[in-house]
Every structure is written in structure tokens, then in C-alpha cells.
Image (spheres, rainbow, N blue to C red):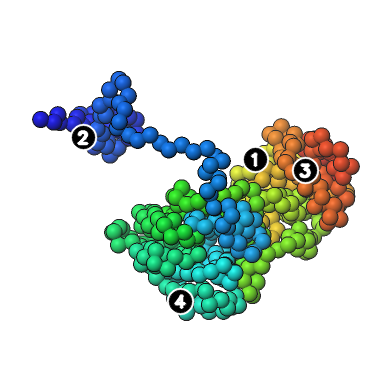
Amino acid sequence: MAKKKETKFVCSNCGEDYTKWTGRCENCGAWNTLVEFFEPKLSANPKSGVGKELQLKSVKEINKTNKQESSRLKTNITDVDNVLGGGLVEASVNLIAGEPGIGKSTLIMQIAASISDSIGKVVYVSGEESAEQVASRAARLKVKSDNLAIVSSTSTDDIAETILKLKPKLIVVDSIQTMACSEVTSATGSVSQVTNSTHILTQAAKASGTALIIVGHVTKEGSLAGPKILEHLVDVVLNLEGDRYGGFKILRAIKNRYGSTSEAGIFEMTESGLRQVDNPSQSLLAERQVTDGSIVFAAMEGTRPILVEVQALVTKTNFGYPKRAASGFDLNRLNLLTAVLTRRTKLNLGEYDIYINVVGGIKLNEPAADLAVAMAIASAAKGLNLKEDLAVAGELGLSGEIRRIPHLEKRINEAKKLGFKGLLAPASGSKSTFIKDAKNLREVLNSCFQK
Ligand code: TYD
Ligand code: MG
């Protein structure tokens, strides 16, 4: 008679084991964490014959038969191709995430149109809009291709079947939150529907060599059932971010199994869809105000330098605690910089409200933005302008020291190109005469401003 398997119950929180199930782990106090566990019977000597030996190949051998690199689907939108690392990879699963209204449907329609024009059959499935609505957007974007089919559906099973039968070059699913598969009973948009639907679509796409683009919504906080969990399931995660109302939209890869994540594409929404912005610095600085509280930051967007105006407003607090608000910049970082300014310079900001605005819907998340933000605050607080027309870049340490930043050469060149007199940044070994060396926040504030 086969010996009965010994079961145990193990707390998934602390690892304590029990012979009986209980609702609460007595060891760590967590509720409902006990799960059944079968103790594996392991012999001291490894047994041969249970598994199969793995078939090993060298990198060279695998690459000889690997067609992935050569079979990229070029979208012919330069920035999109760059961000993807050279185009969509055949049979890859790509997630494009972003807030509602940012332009995801527009961008993927443009990608779908371009691929259907130059490569082959593309299917656009919308679960949010009717086929007529999608078609009228396509007409607005001047899509003419006969190779692009548009259909409205929310059934994952139907879509998977279509992929397997039709084997299109590319299928677009807009959006994954509206899809449901029949096997899962939970509501549309729930975590299990979203993950199961992605799984089914992925398998169908891999089996038929179809590239898959799925759209996922994220909320302002960047969460919501979907995109975050999906990141593990897909090959490429693209993020479209920026301001919903005007301003630039930035396309970034936050995960890419086929390329780097350092590229970024910059777009602008126009009457006829998203248009690539080839000279972002120029448009960003076109309406620049040369007043106090305005500093130009030499930023990097991916591997591309752009010059962004950072504005600060400092006003006396009328009531209660001073208010700090930022658009396009992290609020915690702003609080930290305010503390550094207060402690390491003679500025007293304790009774002042501080507002930061980054022009053009750009979001700054580089530490190199610190110096520009701190200088904008100082300039606004004192009502002083920069002596010379300088661009600024540098990271601030807590003792007010200015730390080195990456891509110095690129930032210098961009600032030169747009006619600045110099770049205020830590020289960190660079011999360029364009650099105005910045070592310490207090020194910089004392030497660079004038009435
Ligand atoms: P959309 O792509 O539908 O956003 P998402 O799919 O991310 O929710 O479009 C976003 C906005 O862009 C929409 O409010 C209308 C506007 N838009 C234009 O300004 N020009 C255009 O050519 C198109 C197609 C849309
Ligand atoms: Mg949409």
C-alpha cells in the first residue's frame, strides 16, 4: 500500500509549520496565511533517470538559427523604432501603458497603419470603441491601407482564435482592461481577467508568429489592476507619459527584452495624430520668460539632451503651514531641496509657499535636475536673475555640495546649439571652457545672480 503523503500547513508569511490548519498563525500573528504543503521525500543521493538531460547549445549555435533580430517590423516612425530597439520583434508581446486620454490609441493606430502599409496584415481590436469610431479615427489619421482590419470585441477567446487562423503580422488589442476570457468568472478588468487574457493572447501570438501590442490604462498614481502585474508577462513595456492637455508626450521603454531602455521618443498631439518633435529644446524655450524664478535645465530624455525651463514661485505664507507644490517634479525631492536651501544657504524659506512648474508637460526624474530647481527657488525668493545666460545641471547632496552628472558632453552640445553662454555644472574632469564649474550651492548662489 502506498504510504499516505504527509501534509503540513505552512505560514506563507513567516514559514512556521503546523500539523493542522488554523485561521491565524500563532508565530507571527498573521491571519489566513496558512497553506497546505507536501513535504518532499528527498534521498541523500541524487537519483538518475527521473528527469531528462537538458539540451545545451552555445550562444553561437543559437544565434545562427535565431531569426528575431533580422525580422523586426519597422514602424517607420523613427522615435518608436528607436525606443523599441529597431522595430517590433516578430512574435513579441508589447504593452503600451499610459493614463487615459494621453494618446495610446492614436499612437498604435499610426503604428498599425504604417506596418499594414509596408509589411502585411494588421488587425486592430478595440474593446472600448465601436469599429465605426475606430475607423473614423483612422480616417482622421489618413489611414488608407487595405491590409488593416478593424474589429470591435471584448472576447479574449475570439481574438486568440482569430490570431491562430489569420496569422496577421501584428495584432493590436485596445485595451486589455476590457477583455475577458470565458474560463475566468471574475469581472472584466479584475486582476485575474487581465492576467489570464494576456496569457491566452500571448500564447496565440507566439504560436502564430504575430507581434502583439496590448494597451493598458494606468491611473495618475501609476497603479491599477493591470499594467504593473502585466510587466512580468510581456517582453516590452512602453510608457506614454506627459500632460493630457497639450505639451509633449514622451514614449519610453521601461522594460525591453530586445533592446535598451535608454531611448525616449518625444511627440506632440496635432490635428492629424501624434507628430514626432525633432527639436524639442527649441520649442520648449520658444516662450521662455527671462525673469526671476526661471532657470533652464539641461536635461536628458533617454539618450537625447533637451533644454527645459524650470519655473519657481515663492510667496509669503498667509495661513498655517507653508505650502509646497510641484508640477513635473517630485514633491518629496522638492521638500528635500527646500531643506538643503534653508540649512546650507542663508535663504529662509520657512514662512514661504513654494511652487515649481516644469514647462511643456515634461516630468523631471533625473537627480541632475536638483541644481536647476534649487536655483529657481533661490532666484524667485530673492527676485534675482542669472548674470549670464546659462543652462544648469547638477545633483545636490545634503550638505549643499554639487555632484557630478552623466552625459556632460551631450548637455554641453545642446546648450551650445541653442545659444547659451555656458553650462553651470560640476566639471568633473571635463576641460570644456563652456563649463562654469559648480561645486557648492552656496558659492553658486553668491556668484551667479544679479538684480
Ligand atoms: P486617444 O489616443 O484616444 O487616447 P487614449 O487611447 O490614450 O485614451 O486620444 C487622446 C486625445 O487626443 C483625444 O482626447 C483626442 C486627441 N486627438 C487629437 O488631438 N488629434 C488626433 O488626431 C487624434 C486621433 C486624437
Ligand atoms: Mg484609447
Circle number at residue 131: 4
* Residue 324 visible from this viewpoint: no
Q: In the displayed structure, would residue 138 be above or below residue 245? A: below
Q: CA distance from mark 2 to mark 3?
A: 61 Å
Whether disc 1's CB lies below 8 Å from ligand 1 is answered no
- Where residue 345 appears, as percent x and y from the top left, is 76, 37
Q: CA distance from mark 3 to mark 1?
A: 24 Å
Q: Nearer the viewer, mark 4 or mark 3?
A: 4
- Secondary structure beneath dot 4 equals helix
- Where residue 192 appears, as percent x and y from the top left, is 35, 54
Viewed as shown, does residue 131 lie left or right of 281?
Answer: left
Q: Nearer the viewer, mark 4 or mark 1?
A: 4
In this view of the protein, which residue sits in the foreground, 56 or 297? Answer: 56
What residue do we see at 65% from left, 52% from top?
Answer: 263
What kind of residue is marked 4?
Ala
Q: Nearer the viewer, mark 2 or mark 1?
A: 2
**Labelled pair 4, 1 in contact (Cβ < 8 Å):** no
Mark 4 or mark 3, earlier in chain:
4
What residue do we see at 69% from left, 55% from top?
Answer: 358
- Secondary structure beneath dot 3 equals helix
